[in-house]
Image (tube, grey):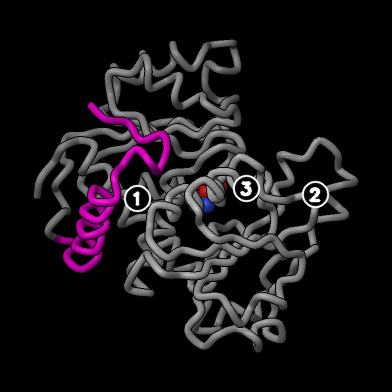
Amino acid sequence: MRHLMNPLDFSVQELDRLFDLANDIENNMPKYAHACAGKKLATCFYEPSTRTRLSFEAAMLNLGGSVLGFSDANSSSAAKGESVSDTIRIISCYADICAMRHPKEGAPMVAAEKSRIPVINAGDGGHQHPTQTLTDLLTIRSLRGRLDHLTIGLCGDLKFGRTVHSLINALSRYEGMRFIFISPDELRIPDYITEMLRDKQIPYEEVIRLEEKMPELDILYMTRVQKERFFNEEDYIRLKDFYILNKKKLRKAPENMLILHPLPRVNEISVDVDDDPRAVYFKQAQYGVYVRMALILTLLNIQV
Ligand code: CP
């Protein structure tokens, strides 16, 4: 039995197979319509979500399976003090696979240790969000044709953004990558990530101004300032609109640059960018369904 806690849990070759499967699903949906008949997915979400929870549920329903779960810790027995370890023992009696989001870093890992079913980390605090990373990688691979020799700019809240941390880890395994970190000082990328890049001799730069590096980017990955991780409301208010990508700023961007965002968006991308052909963040959310379908089939060992 396998869990998914971190995007690095899968080798690059395993990811290639997963993405091939996701692309086959995209092009041949009816072939997979009954692949998970009789199987149940539990979504245990101790933190709010739209995309991750609903795309997991859509994925299982598309595969002919069923879903159960909770979308709020307060509507589960966590509100009465039940531990994650006990909860997963119970969920193991009711479902075949579980996707868990939790505000505490490492909580899905604690669950996996006691689980009798595969557990998928659907986001743990400011730590990792592996299925968002699978979504991001599939989007880049499908729309750009490769995952190597790319310059990727990551912009916004690089301190608390778990999607950013997971994505850098995953992309650092591909050849010829170059990272540009664009953030205010207060939201800089954590040192453990820049140390990892230095150890692997992967080039990176840290800058404050987005426009400065725009012409060099193959991918621009925008992120929201993570209000829920701030200790101080004043700091959030000061930083929340630090970056607003609009049509004017995009004039300096290459014609074939892709703009990704894990969403939800707040103000960091102006809606006037949405109809730019480079803006692929809504397509990205659609890829999230295909890759989660592929992941469910892989972890349940179902061949179609
Ligand atoms: N991208 C993402 O994790 O969105 P949700 O918080 O809506 O699941």
Q: For marks 1 and 2, give the CA distance.
A: 37 Å
Look at the numbered disc 1 and give the secondary structure of its residue.
helix
Magenta segment range?
1-30
The residue where tag 2 is placed is 186
- Mark toward the start of the polypeptide (3 vs 2): 3
Which residue is more in the foreground, 6 or 111? 6
How many marks the image carries: the answer is: 3
**Figure check: 7 above or below 110:** below
Look at the numbered disc 3 and give the secondary structure of its residue.
loop
Q: How crowded is mark 2: few (under 14 residues within 10 Å), some or many (20 or more)?
A: few
> At 21% across and 42% down in the image, what residue appears?
298
* Residue 58 image label: 1
The residue where tag 3 is placed is 161
**110 on left or right of 229:** left
Residue 26, position in %: x, y?
25, 64
Q: Residues within 10 Å of mark 1 (few under 14, many from 20)?
A: many
- Mark toward the start of the polypeptide (1 vs 3): 1
Residue 65, position in %: x, y?
23, 41
> At 23% across and 51% down in the image, what residue appears?
13
Which amino acid type is marked by label 2?
Glu
Which amino acid type is marked by label 1?
Ala
